[in-house]
Image (spheres, helix red, strand yellow):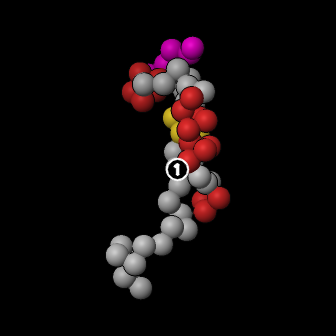
Amino acid sequence: MIKSRLCDLIETRYPIIQAGMGPFSNNNLAVAAANAGVLGLLSTSGIVDSKTQPW
């Protein structure tokens, strides 16, 4: 465990943020990162919803 202000802010064991990887991201990577003690993010790039995308 590494103690830092970032760890205190995001309540993780390590000061690492795993970034979402565009349309290639899925929940498996974010969950694995969170289980390892870092902040895992899920990208919404490439996700299209006709209700939120007016074009």
Q: From this viewpoint, is residue 17 visible?
A: no
- Residue 4 screen position, x and y as percent: 49, 19
- Residue 3 screen position, x and y as percent: 51, 14
Up-down relation of residue 20 to residue 52 (above or below): above
Q: Range of the magenta residues?
A: 1-5
Read off the residue under disc 1. Answer: 42
Up-down relation of residue 25 to residue 38 (above or below): below
How many neighbours does mark 1 have within 10 angstroms: few (below 14), some (14-19), or many (20 or more)?
Answer: some
Residue at image coords 55%, 25% = 37
Task: State how many labels appear.
Answer: 1
Q: Is residue 2 magenta?
A: yes
Furthest toward the bottom, the residue is: 55
Q: Name the amino acid type tagged 1.
A: Leu
Up-down relation of residue 30 to residue 11 (above or below): below
Residue at image coords 62%, 43% = 29
Viewer-proximal residue among 10 and 35: 35
For the stretch drawn in magenta, what is the main secondary structure? loop
Mark 1 residue element: loop
Q: From this viewpoint, is residue 50 visible?
A: yes
Left or right: residue 21 versus residue 11 is right
- State the quadrant of the N terminus: top right
